[in-house]
Amino acid sequence: MNPSEQGPAKPSGFVPLLLIALAFITVETGTILRDRAQLHGLKAQVEQLENASRKNQEADAKLHSLLASLLRLAEVDSEVKAILTRHRLRFAPSTPSAGASR
């Protein structure tokens, strides 16, 4: 029998399987790229938060120092003492700051 005389050829399952594999690879590649972009964004946010926290701690320390200086000045200056009393400002050096307890 001649090959041209045989019935229709049975379709191969290779092409559909190849298309499914390519679609899967494309979707997974997109997912990986999206996850990497999200990771990069999260790392940038963490760095910004760490910088903000560091600046907050520095400002807290400066404010603490300023209040200590004001209280020392209030010991010799009655006007400063009146201002501190009017605003009810007190200094408790043994009390840890809220940021230190975290």
Image (tube, rainbow, N blue to C red):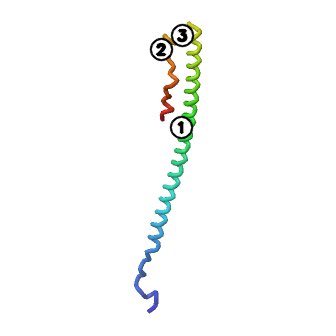
Question: What residue does disc 2 label?
Answer: 88
Q: How far apart are the two marked residues, 3 and 2, measured between alpha carbons?
A: 10 Å
Q: Position of residue 94 (x, y in %)?
A: 50, 25
Look at label 2 and name its amino acid: Arg
Front of the two marks 2 and 1: 2
Question: What residue does disc 1 label?
Answer: 49
Q: Secondary structure at mark 2?
A: loop
Q: Secondary structure at mark 3?
A: helix
Q: Position of residue 54 (x, y in %)?
A: 57, 34
- Pointer 3: residues within 10 angstroms few (<14), some, or many (20+)? some
Q: How far apart are the two marked residues, 3 and 1, measured between alpha carbons?
A: 38 Å
Look at label 3 and name its amino acid: Lys
Is the residue under label 2 in contact with that under label 3 (CB below 8 Å)? Answer: no
From the viewer's side, name the closer residue of 88 and 92: 92
Look at label 1 and name its amino acid: Leu
Identify the residue at image location x=58%, y=8%.
77
From the viewer's side, name the closer residue of 65 and 30: 65
Identify the residue at image location x=47%, y=14%.
88
26 lies above or below 39: below
Q: Position of residue 46 (x, y in %)?
A: 53, 41
Displayed quadrant of residue 48:
top right
